[in-house]
Amino acid sequence: MRMRTLLILTALTIAGMAFACKAPKDETAAKKPVHNPKQHSVRRAEMEEKVVKTDAEWRKILTPEQYRIMREKGTEQAFTGKYWNENAKGEYLCAACGYKLFDSSQKFDSACGWPSFSQPASQDSISTSVDHSFGMEREEVICSHCGAHLGHVFTDGPKPTGLRYCINSAALNLKRKP
């Protein structure tokens, strides 16, 4: 019975992800590159020392949920993360390495159940990669400092960027501003 309930919850979570965070059907918008690293001659994160840890070290640092999301590219269930409905001012840092990823001034309510941002703190904060999991093509968002999976970015966000960085709360720590 417990296993059946877990399977049902997992299926509902995946279905919710596909529905809530599905990229627009406009194929021209979906094929546009979200982030072009060639635009930056030298990235700050590449000049800094990257955080490199063994699997065992990550398991000691991260909670089991953070490890599943950040190192195994998982996701949290929609509307359950601690920051999906957070409105406090501050900086959102990578929960794995403490690198500044997003600023609260760029956070908006996308009604998808995960914290959403219109842009990163800087172009050096994150990198992206194509993700083909769950039968979809999405743009994965990765911490450029430690390589942790954060979430995905979609082209249905507010102006002026038109982007929606849909990020797992478990991948973030909010450093509140007074």
Image (tube, rainbow, N blue to C red):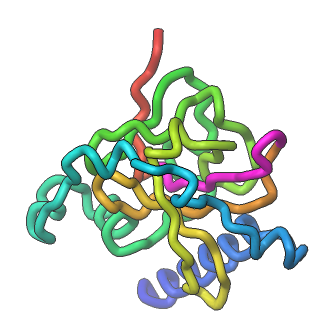
Q: Nearer the viewer, residue 12 or 63?
A: 63
Pick out the residue farthest to the front. 41
Residue 69 image offset from top left, x and y in percent: 39, 66
User: Looking at the image, which is closer to me, 122 or 66?
Assistant: 122
At 66% from the left edge and 61% from the top edge, which residue is drawn? 34
User: Is residue 107 depicted above or below 138 in this figure?
Assistant: above
The relative height of residue 5 versus residue 28 in the rendered view (above or below) is below
Image quadrant assignment for residue 103? top right
Magenta region includes residue 91: no
Residue 143: x and y, percent?
A: 39, 54
* Residue plotted at (49% across, 23% down): 90
Please identify the quarter of the rendering in which residue 155 is found.
bottom right
Comparing 32 with 79, the one in front is: 32
Q: Is residue 69 visible?
A: yes
Q: Is residue 89 left or right of residue 171?
A: right
Residue, x 42% and y 84% (percent of image)? 2
Which residue is at a point 29% across and 39% down the rendered structure image?
A: 98
| Residue 117 percent across, percent down from the top left | 64, 43
Q: Can you give x and y, in whole percent of width and height, for residue 72 in the image?
A: 35, 74
- Answer left or right for 37 relative to 173: right
Q: Is residue 80 visible?
A: no
Residue 165 in magenta stretch: yes
The residues colored magenta run 159-169
Seen from the viewer's position, the closer of residues 22 and 124 is: 124
Q: Is residue 27 left or right of residue 169?
A: right
Q: Is residue 178 left or right of residue 8?
A: left
